[in-house]
Image (cartoon, rainbow, N blue to C red):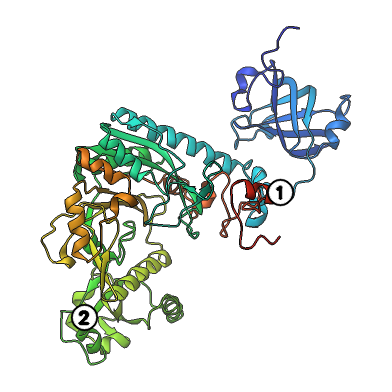
Amino acid sequence: MEYEFNKYRTNTCIEINKSFISKKVKIAGWIRTKRDHGGILFLDIYDHSGMIQCTIHPEHSGFSQIEDLKVESVISVLGEVVLRDDQNINKNIPSGEIELIIESFNILSSAEILPFALHQEDLNEELQLSYRFLYLRTPEMQKILKLRTDVINFLRNQMNSLGFQEIQTPLLASPSPEGARDYVVPSRMHPGKFYALPQAPQQFKQLLMASGVSKYFQIAPCFRDEDSRADRLIGEFYQLDFEMAFAQQEDVLNVLQSVLSKTFKEFSDAEIEDVFPRIPYTEAIETYGTDKPDLRNPLKIFDITDIQEAPDILKPVVEKGGRLLTVSVKMDYNNNELKKLTKVMMDKGAKGLAYCYLKDGSWTGPLSKMLSTETLKQATQKDDHNLLFLIADTYDISHKLSGMLITELGNMLNLINKNDYKFCFITDFPMFEKTDGVWDFMHNPFSMPQDIDLPLGEILSYQYDVVCNGYEITSGAVRNHNLNLIHKVFSLIGQDASDLESRFPVFKSFKYGVPPHAGAAPGIDRIIMLLSKKSNVRDIVAFPMNQKGENLLMESPCFLDEKFLKEIAIKTLDNSK
């Protein structure tokens, strides 16, 4: 028998247009909708590429079969392409000017009644995660899956063009003594021993630098046993992991700037700056109240702690080293709105929200009784700003709350253009921070310090983030490749580094000649989330877990059979079912 190239279809739906009129084609796909117009059945059949309308008349021998089929059944259809009547043209789909008159068909798979309608809005998350394969059929999710594929390919092509070498690193590694909790894998061949899924390929990529690789990258899966957040997946995520030998901070920032700006230009209509502003960490905290500023928001913090003699009610804050911070804005005075805003801020931890407003050229309200007119004038950052807020607390709390206030006001007053993408580098992170009187590393202890001879609180590190629209999408650092300097850094805060080599195998390589190196790891999931205009990273992943770390479709995690547990030398404390 002669082989038929594809017995299911000659074309995908998107390929069929007016040039096919009077031709016979075969398509295959799902029945999205069925409509009965005067006895004639109209079927919208869709595949991965798009949708086309098919028509079957009552006199067709298979009419009753089609009539009995439920939506989302899979069918292959042979028919003639004809032009639609003018009144039936659908301008919302590419094939809206044509339709297919069904001559023959083959039912490939019959569907049962769906647990939910694919066009249903505000769908219960538990239901859509339990039937994720159905939810993925929606045009929105198909668009996101396609976007993800295209973005990853684009990123890979850029890295190749910049001379980076793609290398896959192991997924079965050793537990990490630092960072988040590991996911561990028992070894059958070595009873009682465990592998760990990598939280990141950090040690491996540094070992590659010691191995003579000049520029490494991979689309790396990472595994961390962390709690869920809107911008963080439970379990696994992907990053564009890269490292460069003989590199300084500037080299990495240039790569990040080029790759990210080109990617967002390629997949959005927004104007993307070619050069990202650089904001030192301390400046970010004191200007925006966060090291993840949303630069689409024009509001900023203004510090009035040293402007004038503090009023009696605020003196205790100043005397204890706290800050008096203001935020000004243009806003119609509305007492109810201000009460709501005050409640929101108090729910976030504020003791209250003092404010005053400009009316007929004079300041009025509670804050006007605390501060002089001159101070209020200086604190008002723009001439048209008529409302001023004050937050007084410790340095950390006042800046954190002021940053939250900026965000609330920006959203409340629609000051943020949702179609923009505003990037920045956050640089010069402190090497150490003091908590409850004890010094510790602020972030990665193995980053290169900028000047080790300064007082502890003034030592900065060569660490950097890329922030876009209030989300950290990249972190990276220049690595400390000098073992003696690593030991010195630890000794500054009284920590013992004598066992580093046993805890971190990468340091073994440092004894045999390792070049200076630096790198970063843009988060692919957050990039896709931003490009698809989603606010939750779970919305852009094919099969995400819920907030409890459960995959409802695969019913994982699950209990293991006792026979299997015995084989891998595992005994559980509680295996109740």
Kind of element beneath mark 1:
loop
Instruction: Name the residue type under label 1.
Output: Ala
Answer with left or right where residue 404 lies relative to residue 221.
left
Residue 503 % position (x, y): 34, 52
Q: Quadrant of the C terminus?
A: bottom right
Residue at image location 70% in from the left, 12% down from the top: 4
Q: Is residue 174 above or below residue 295?
A: above
Question: How far apart are labels 2 and 1 at the CA level?
Answer: 58 Å
Instruction: Name the residue type under label 2.
Output: Gly
Residue 13 % position (x, y): 63, 27
Q: Is residue 276 above or below residue 341?
A: above
Kind of element beneath mark 2:
loop
Residue at image location 19% in from the left, 43% down from the top: 248
Residue 266 % position (x, y): 38, 36
Q: Residue furthest left?
A: 453
* Residue nearest the viewer, comparing 33 with 547: 547
Answer with left or right where residue 201 lies relative to residue 340.
left
- Categorize mark 2 by other alpha carbons within 10 Å: few (<14), some (14-19), many (20+): few
Q: Earlier in the sequence, mark 2 or mark 1?
A: 1
Q: Which residue is mark 1?
A: 117
Dot in front, 2 or 1: 2
Q: Which mark is residue 103?
A: none
Q: In this orientation, does residue 461 appear? A: no
Q: Which residue is mark 2?
A: 321
- Categorize mark 1 by other alpha carbons within 10 Å: few (<14), some (14-19), many (20+): few
Residue 234 % position (x, y): 51, 54
Q: In this orientation, does residue 295 appear? A: yes
Q: Is residue 554 above or below residue 167?
A: below
* Residue nearest the viewer, comparing 294 with 461: 461
Q: Is residue 311 above or below residue 402?
A: below
